Each structure stands twice: as C-alpha cells, then as structure tokens.
Amino acid sequence: MINQLIANIKKTNAPVVVGLDPMMKFVPEYIQRDAFEQYGETLEGAAEAVWQFNKGIVDAVCDLVPAVKPQVAMYEQFGIPGMTVFKRTVDYCKEKGLVVIGDVKRGDIGSTSEAYAVGHLGRVSVGSRSYSAFDEDFVTVNPYLGSDGVKPFMKVCAREKKGIFVLVKTSNPSSGEFQDRLMDGKPLYELVGEKVAQWGAECMPEDGDYSYVGAVVGATYPEQGRIMRKVMPKSFILVPGYGAQGGKGADLVDFFNEDGLGAIINSSRGIIAAYQQEEYAHFGERGYADAARAAVLHMREDISTALANR
Amino acid sequence: MINQLIANIKKTNAPVVVGLDPMMKFVPEYIQRDAFEQYGETLEGAAEAVWQFNKGIVDAVCDLVPAVKPQVAMYEQFGIPGMTVFKRTVDYCKEKGLVVIGDVKRGDIGSTSEAYAVGHLGRVSVGSRSYSAFDEDFVTVNPYLGSDGVKPFMKVCAREKKGIFVLVKTSNPSSGEFQDRLMDGKPLYELVGEKVAQWGAECMPEDGDYSYVGAVVGATYPEQGRIMRKVMPKSFILVPGYGAQGGKGADLVDFFNEDGLGAIINSSRGIIAAYQQEEYAHFGERGYADAARAAVLHMREDISTALANR
C-alpha cells in the first residue's frame, strides 16, 4: 500500500490527505435534518448524517487527492451505528481508488496489539475461515509501549503489504510535555524516530524505496520535521496540523525528501468544513462539498508552489 | 465511580479485576461449535462465541470481584459484531453490579480525545438529545500526547463521576524502551506519574480520598510500583501482569497504601483460561467458568495473605 500511496500521489500531483473527522458542528443543518427525519435524533440518525456528509466530500475530492484519513473517534462516539459508518466510509473511499489511513492511534502489547493489527489491517480467523473487519490500508499507532506494541502491526503489514504511521511528534500544543523531554541530550521524539527508522528498515516492500513503517510529525513543528526527515529517510511522514492548526505550505518543504516524496500533508477541518470559513463562505452550506474541493485545490497549489520554490 | 469501585473492593475483600480478553483460543470448543452452528463461521459467529464465553465467566465470578476489564481489541478484531458484543458485555457486567474498566488505551488531542471520552464515558449530543454509546465506568488512556490528550477525559470524568487509568509503566518486556529512559535523572514513567498526580489533584470527587485519575503500573515491575505509589498518593493504580505475565501477590504489596486500598490487580488469561492450566485442568472445558471461579479464589487468597504479612 505504500507503493499504491506513492502511485496515487504521483497521479494527483498532490501529497495531500483529507481528514474525514466529521464533527457534527461541521455537518450542514440540512443534512442533519434529513437524517433525523429518517432515523430520529438517535445514534443511527447521527451516523446517517455523518455518512451523507462524508459521501459528499469524497465524491467532490476523490479525483484530486491520493488518500483520506478518517478519524475513528468521530465515529466511535456514536457507538455501533458510528462504527458501522466508519466501515462504510472506509469501503466507499477504497471503491473510489483512495488510500485509506485509519487514524486510530491504537497501541497495546503482544497479542492485544496483534488483535488491533488484524482487525484494522489484516484478517481475523474464525474457525476455518478468515475475515477483514475494518480493512484500512494504513493505521496510526502509538509507540508508548515500545517494540512489543509495534511489532505485531509490522508482522501484519509485511503479510498484507499494508502500513502504519507511528506517532513521533504530534501537532498539539502540549505534545512537548513528554515528547520534547531530553534523554541523553536527545528529545524523546527523536529516540522514537530512531526506532521508527529501525522498524522501517525491517519492514520494506520488495519493490519500493519507502518502508511500510511511517511516522507522524506535526506540521506545527517544522524544525522537528527537518530533523526527523533525516533520521527516518525511508519512512513516509504523515503531517497533521496544516491549515486550521496553523501549518502552511512554506513551512513544510523540509518534511519532503529530494525526490519530492516522503511526506503527505493532512488537512481535516480546513477542507471538510471549508464552507464555514470566510474565504469559502460564498459556497453556502449546500455547497459544502464544492467548498471542500476548492480548499483542496488551494492546498495543492500552496504545497506545490512551496516545493517548487525550495 | 471511584467510590463505587472502593465500595465494591471492601464488600468483596478482593482488590481484583478480571480481564475479559476473550481470545478465541481461550473459548472452549463446544461454545465455538454451538455459536458456529447458529451463525456459521462468520464474524457474528465469533462474536456470539465470545459473548457466551464471557457470560459464563461473569456469572461465575460476579459475587467475588469488584470489577472487570474488557480489552476492546479482542472485540474490535471481529468488527461490528465484535463491538456489539463489547457493548453487551459492558451492559451485562454493570447489571451484575460490577465496575467496568474499558481497556481501550485511547488518547488523541483536543476535540478528538473529547470524542473518545464522550463515547466511552459520557453522553454524545444528537440534535436536542444525548446518548451513551459504550458507557464504561473507567477507561485506560495513553499519555504520549500530553495534557491536551488527557484533559478532555478529565472534564467528562468530573461531569459523569467516572474515571481513567493513565498508562504510566506498562507490564510488557519492552516497556522500558521509552518509559525507562532518563530525563534529568528521572525515568519517563516517573514524569508521567508526576503528571498523573497533578491531574489527579485537579479531579477529585467531593466525597472521597481517591481521584478520578488513576494510573497503570505493571505487576512485573514491583520496584517501580513502590516508587509510583508514593509519587501518586491519591491515584488508584491498576496493576496488570499478575499470573500469566509473572506477577505474584507478595510482589504487589507496595502498590497498596497503608489503608489497604489504592491498587487493583488485574488477571486476564490466568482466570478466564484457568481451565487450560494444569492446576485447574480437572474442571475440563465444560467447567471453564468454575475453573475461573477457583482461580479468582486463589488469587484473592494470595493477595490478602501477602497484604496481611507485609
């Protein structure tokens, strides 16, 4: 799937991921109203609104971007109906040729990490048969538990040719509380990055330059991105925090390798809720999907200009 | 819920949590066969087998223990049917008077952590109404993203009188890779523990001595348990790793405060798969629930003897 991701990036000329984080406040009133008329103000109604919203966004942007990143928390909060729509979203995006990065930030030990890996990336055995449960192409993984927590994912990635992005330096203001603390003169995130490089070297596709093991480094920390790019040369970096969280194209050039690859920039609310921003307000709520398309085009332009000027 | 947990511990005289981690290899053949006859070798069939297995365990031990800890990964791997049985297990355990600790190890930033907190501990808004999605009493939380990731859980805990256990020092062999690294002479887990103490002080019930914010420290690291007990005096410590992972009652006394409270010891496979161990093999697979009951009684005895002799 890392090779599919790269092929999609080259085809679209856009190292851009659309974050499908459908908070209800982003979903236009008319979509909520229609869903509630059909299912009532229930978890099913909320999940239906999320689904219709997502479908509109995906239809509007699927020819422009290589990948989407549904944030599972936004679905999980609506319980079983929400998880059902998470799965429907994954399937629909894959039908549209998009690479799907499940932003699940799972991570546990041994057999428990294996269960997450199997459930999200692989196939689970049931008697003599096996099934894919959620079947994303990539997932995000939390490294706090160490190699025991990550290796079961790597095993499934190698078998299924899928991938993970390990949290290294997150985009939030308090990410430094633990991640920036110095150990032997190096911040924790750099030690995690060194481990990612090592895990990455053990988990390469037969026919490609980038590993199945990538990393997450926030757009809000461009200086760290520059360093981590060098520490993890074979790892794709998933970069959240563009747009709404403050990152701009010009800040992000050092997340990329010389080949123009190696990074993929995520924007969530900056795209899916573009119609709520002044710049795209003229689309109106019924034009939310067109606003999203316009925001993707601006973002692609911003990043490619920055890469051309570096 | 921390007060309910304490009341349950006093009533049962057992600071014991049964980990409901139903790997299929623990589920007796006859239960799998019955479930597959009804639903086929499908995700629904696997989920039904897990549910029947859990129900047997819960019925057999619910008068002996204060709490259970379902590990969500073991349900999530079976997709929507698995998550449906996770929810059914949570509800059933609560009906039986057990405190339910969802071992979900979630953690993200800002509005995303809020969505997890709302979905697992609180109520999610849908139009003019609100719903509980999974409704555990406690969940486990990963601290790697810092305060941004934890505070949304604390907000929901304060509102709902529920609780969290933050991962501090996990029980797995490679937990030291990052958690033991020294920063200014102190290991990372101790810095996380100091944060837990601070978060805990900000999130106390009106009428109790222990905080809504607890910690996870593995039974396999008793020396660290002794230190962390002092660092986080107001936090309950959830202690995984008893039994199968090597921890014994005598090693665990320093996880408790002088009042005999402050820790709750988890055993998963040591109880739910007791019938597969030599010591309890005479129960046979049809006696798996009775074997679990016998294992709980032994564990309670082991811990209370150790506490009496300290």
Image: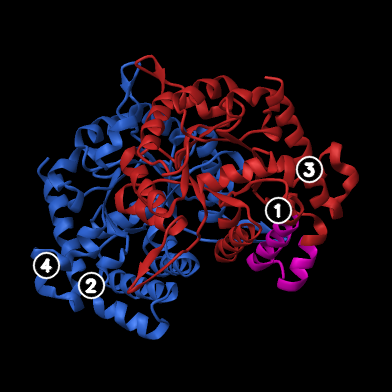
Chain colours: A blue, B red
Which residue position is annotated with label 2? A289
Nearer the viewer's eye, disc 4 or disc 3?
3
Q: Who is closer to the viewer here, A220 or B192?
A: B192
Between A218 and B60, the residue placed more toward the observer is B60
Q: Secondary structure at mark 4?
A: helix
Q: Residue at x 32, y 61 (%)?
A: A20
Which segment is the magenta one? B32-56
Nearer to me, A47 or A6:
A47
Residue A93: tell me if it is visible: yes
For the point 9% across and 64% down, the residue is A278
Marked residue nearer the N-terminal end (4 or 2):
4
Q: Kindly indicate whether the residue at mark 3 contacts the one at mark 4 (C-beta within 8 angstroms).
A: no
Q: What residue does disc 4 label?
A: A280
- Label number found at residue B24: 1
What is the crowding at mark 2: few (fewer than 14 residues within 10 Å), some, or many (at least 20)? many
Instruction: Return the x and y of residue B290 as percentages of the image width and height.
Output: 82, 50
Q: Residue at x 71, y 54 (%)?
A: B58
Residue B274: which numbered mark, if any? 3
Residue at (32%, 39%) from the top-left corner? Answer: B147
Q: Which chain is mark 3 on?
A: B
Q: Marks 4/2: CA distance?
A: 11 Å
Residue type at mark 2 is: Ala
